[in-house]
């Protein structure tokens, strides 16, 4: 298609392109315009002087970042929590979707779907309050059960040995059902004639699941995995911020919470911006690398 043909096609569908305008304006105003603030990372930013009059210091804050022991501990925490979530939580929505697809009683199927979706609509503030109560070392239900079996109460949210496990568990409890929707939708898009042909050949449910359903949703699985890899350094800032405390900084402080503490807590805006920029660049590199690996080994790409 030559350039003139493209313009004719665009003009003939001008009303459809017009629908893009509000979304493009939103992206420009709220996504791209604030990117100008990235220059703070290269300045000794003073809130009273503003961006225009603050002193330029080049890569000083990035050097500080590289030589900061706290940051490497934070980076380690971020990677560990994110990897735990990918390895332990990413496969579960796929399994849930596959199992729900095999349920034949629609009332039971919809009831289960509703129950597992509901936690997604609760804010992390509500969920944190719920689990703080359940895991309380004095009167929490979990510790009451532990005591009843002869054990000693555990301070789950104040112990570095347990905090990451609590973070991963609560993230799964909240989001597994919602994430399963994507895979359920992908399963619904598989051609039903394949199942009918497999039934004629004598294939059972498990064989259909392995030979038809899984290959059918593999592009969706690859896409979701690449997106998860791209957000590897986003370990759940909002979640951890509402649950952690200074006692578990060694195991629970991630890049997002570190930026919050340094930026708003200590008002070191330049350093926190440098950390955030580092986070974004690494995320961009990861998602590009994940797409290239997918294209090379799985012959599938998200663009």
Image: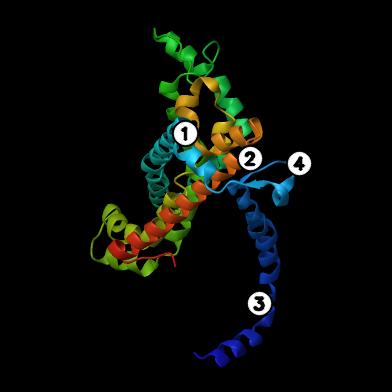
Quarter of the image holding residue 201? bottom left
Q: CA distance from mark 2 to mark 4?
A: 12 Å
As displayed, is residue 8 above or below residue 179? below
Question: Along the horizontal axis of the image, is 33 left or right of 288?
Answer: right
Mark 2 nearby-residue class (10 Å; few <14, some 14–19, many ≥20): many
The secondary structure type at the circle numbered 1 is: loop
Pick the front one: 22 or 170: 22
Picture residue at 67% right of the left edge, 65% below the top: 23
Q: What secondary structure is found at the residue carrying circle 3?
A: helix
Q: CA distance from mark 4 to mark 3?
A: 45 Å
Pointer 4: residues within 10 angstroms few (<14), some, or many (20+)? Answer: few
Lower sequence index among marks 1 and 4: 4
The residue that disc 1 covers is 68
Q: Which badge, 4 or 3, is on the more N-terminal residue?
A: 3
Given residues 49 and 90, the one toward you in this image is 49
Which residue position is annotated with label 3?
Answer: 16
Tell whether 275 sits left or right of 230: right
Which numbered mark, 2 or 4, is in the foreground of this view?
A: 4
Nearest to N terminus: mark 1 or mark 2: 1
Residue 27 appears in the picture as rendered: yes
* Residue 291 vertical position relative to residue 44 in the rendered view, above or below: below
Disc 3, disc 1: CB below 8 Å? no
Q: CA distance from mark 3 to mark 2?
A: 42 Å
Residue at mark 2: 269
Nearest the eye: 73 or 223: 73
| Residue sitting at the far top | 150
In this rendering, which labeled residue sits more in front, label 3 or label 2? 2
Mark 3 → mark 1, Cα distance in angstroms: 51 Å
Q: CA distance from mark 1 to mark 2?
A: 16 Å
| Residue to which mark 4 is pinned | 48
């Amino acid at each position: 298609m030559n350039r003139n043909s493209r313009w004719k096609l665009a003009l003939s569908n001008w009303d459809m392109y017009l629908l893009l305008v509000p979304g493009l304006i939103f992206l420009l105003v709220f996504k791209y315009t604030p990117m100008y603030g990235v220059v703070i990372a290269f300045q000794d930013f003073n809130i009273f002087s503003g961006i225009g009059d603050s002193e330029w210091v080049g890569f000083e804050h990035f050097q500080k970042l590289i030589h900061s022991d706290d940051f490497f501990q934070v980076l380690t925490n971020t990677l560990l929590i994110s990897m735990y979530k990918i390895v332990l939580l990413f496969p579960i929505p796929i399994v849930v979707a596959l199992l729900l697809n095999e349920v034949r009683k629609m009332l039971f199927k919809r009831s289960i779907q509703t129950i597992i979706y509901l936690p997604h609509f609760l804010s992390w503030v509500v969920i944190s309050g719920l689990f703080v109560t359940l895991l309380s070392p004095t009167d929490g239900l979990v510790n009451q059960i532990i005591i009843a079996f002869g054990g000693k109460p555990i301070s789950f949210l104040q112990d570095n040995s347990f905090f990451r496990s609590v973070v991963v568990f609560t993230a799964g409890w909240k989001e597994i059902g919602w994430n399963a929707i994507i895979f359920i939708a992908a399963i619904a898009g598989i051609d039903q004639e394949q199942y009918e042909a497999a039934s004629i050949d004598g294939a059972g449910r498990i064989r259909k699941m392995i030979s038809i359903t899984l290959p059918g949703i593999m592009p969706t699985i690859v896409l979701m995995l690449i997106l998860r890899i791209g957000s590897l350094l986003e370990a759940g800032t909002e979640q951890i911020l509402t649950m952690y405390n200074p006692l578990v900084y060694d195991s629970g402080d991630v890049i997002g919470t570190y930026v919050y503490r340094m930026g708003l807590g200590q008002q070191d805006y330049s350093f926190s911006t440098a950390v955030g920029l580092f986070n974004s660049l690494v995320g961009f590199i990861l998602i590009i690398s994940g797409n290239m690996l997918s294209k090379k080994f799985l012959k599938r790409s998200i663009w």
